[in-house]
Image (cartoon, rainbow, N blue to C red):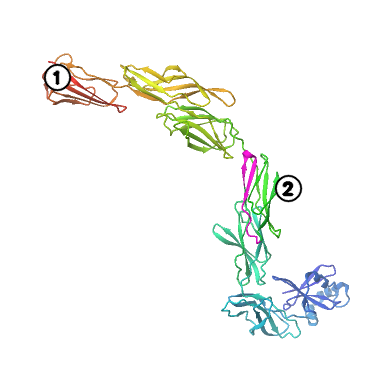
Amino acid sequence: MNNLFWKNNIGKDSKYSTHPFISFSKLFEEQQKRVVFFEEGKKGRRIYDLRSNSKIGDSDFQNYSTNFSNHKSVFPFSLLQKKLQLLGFVFLLSLFFSNKTVAQVLPPDFLCVRSDTLIWNIPTNPCGSFNAYEIYFSDMPNGPFNLLATVTNPGQNIYHHPNPTGNTWYYYMQSDFNCVGEPILQSDTLDNQQPEIAIINKASANGNSIELEWTASPSPETSGYIVFRNTSLGTIPLDTIYNGTTYVDNNASPNTQPETYFILALDECGNTSIFNTPHTTVFLTQTVAGCDQEINLSWNRYEGWTNGIGSQEVWFSLDGNMPTLIATLSATDSTYTFENATDLQDHCFYIRSIEAGTGIDALSNEICLVPDLVNAMRDLILRNVNVLPDNSVELTWSWNSNAEIQSVEILNSNANGGYSILDSSPAPMPLGNASSFIDVVSDPVSGKVFYQIQTTDDCDTLVFSNYGSTIHLTGSPQPGSSNFLTWTDFDIENAMVTDYDIYRIVDGSISFVKNVPAGTTTFSDPVDGSNESESNVCYYVVANAEVMLPNGGIEMIESTSNIACIEQLTSIIAPNAFAPQGRNQIFKPFVIFGETVDYQLTIYNRWGELLFETKDIDQGWNGKYKGKIQPMGAYVFHVRIIQQSGREIEEHGVFTLLR
């Protein structure tokens, strides 16, 4: 059911349903006796002056509207309203159209050409009987056109035009009905090619969305547009737009990545244009150079414009104020440094790209940040290097607690140079005034170990502490039952040793030995040969030192060396004679500091015959062999001992058996 439109006497649109066979609304201008039809549909508004069989523009349409209340002839509005009330809507329309009907011969609704087949919708022309649909064609868009075919089946809506050579043809259609004197309208002119591409004008970020605008495809068969976007899964369709040439992608990610779009023109048969030139949005990122009070902007340049980029603009706002233009850049720029940033205030930026020659613009995502400008590392000082009882190494250092650093690295070396990273870890939060680290990898028993602390701040600036090293202690047993100690000097930069304390450990008990002045690096400690527990004595040295702090103060520290254990040399004393039937009835060597893990005693006669063997350090020879006392004379002994340290000791000699 279509609608009858006219202007009522108060200037507002009025409409009533009309006869189902009337395909256009009517407007009557009584004074000029002109009849005007207009149609609004998917192909836009068409307005016709039937007296001249010509189109009129939208701006002229109001001139044809009739205010019926100002005319006394031909259905004044008030009379028409009364008649509608009294006679009924259907009777009034029948009477009206029996006297005033003016018709047009509508063409088929020519939809598209697909695979050399023309497709249309069948028109409704109530003005007369059907004769045929006429198809005209040409190899030029503006003709001349010749009759290609006459379709005499009123229900037929397709026609196949073979095109084996792939020529480009242009077609239009019109209807042949027995409507004498009525104007014959022609369809749109379509070609047999896929729709021409729609040119994207811009892809512009707006918050979390991307706004797309494009120029309509010039192909009249175009009925819609398919919007595509590149994703990690490939190029996928987002939506089909049937009205308009804009689209808002609310599922885009303009704040995390650039987005790339294509537009395909679509006709009623599903034919699509080829992919047009893609357009890629500008994705803006930033980094803060806090130590330089700068914000560095970086972006990918806009892609897709036919004329390329003419210029780029950087826009900035502070703490929510209106954005202002702060820089105009060339088409090739993709970075910008914003200087003199303000600490702890909201900074917002976006890039405006402008196409050369057209002035079309596209916006990047907007980035906002509150820069926390970097507080530099200061006062970094290694205060102590201390070897723990398990021979791991504890480092302690101090720094300014407000320093903004990313990581802390522990550096070590076997000499004061050629440092390597022993450990790297994120900066502790909160930083505090001091920190520590325990090194369980290095071996302070084998030699001196040097350390430094390194920090990396948010500007990738490296700061190094002073160096410090362990005290390396060694010792050796000396003849005459003493242990000789040697250690390396206390060595922490910006610190000075005052003296050393020497400690010994016997059977797990720690005792103070002696305090020696700075500059002393050796010491001899006597041991008690009669005390078996002193066969293995451990030692460590503590350096008492003063560390100069960055603020000029002095801190007393104690730096402990590694633990060094000294095993006394085992001494073997054997008697030179024994009497199996006298006072000394057992021959047994004496082992002094005999902390052994293996012991063997063997005895031979003068002919080399083995008479006795034992691995028990407490067992001696009673002078018997196979149960008989051996004759008086000289015999040979051999003792073999392995100490806990792995040292092997052997002793042999001759003794006399007396009877």
Label 2: how many residues lie within 10 Å, few (<14), some (14-19) or many (20+)? few
* 236 left or right of 106 in image: left
Is 493 or 577 nearer to us in this picture? 493
Q: Position of residue 255 (x, y in %)?
A: 62, 51
Q: Position of residue 542 (x, y in %)?
A: 45, 22
* 581 left or right of 142 in image: left
Amino acid type shown at disc 2: Met
Residue at numbered disc 1: 634
Q: Position of residue 522 (x, y in %)?
A: 41, 20
Q: Residue at x 80, y 82 (%)?
A: 99
**As drawn, 15 above or below 100:** above
Q: CA distance from mark 2 to mark 1?
A: 116 Å
Of callouts 2 and 1, the N-terminal one: 2
Residue at numbered disc 2: 322
Q: Report the span colored magenta.
A: 286-306
Q: Is residue 292 magenta?
A: yes
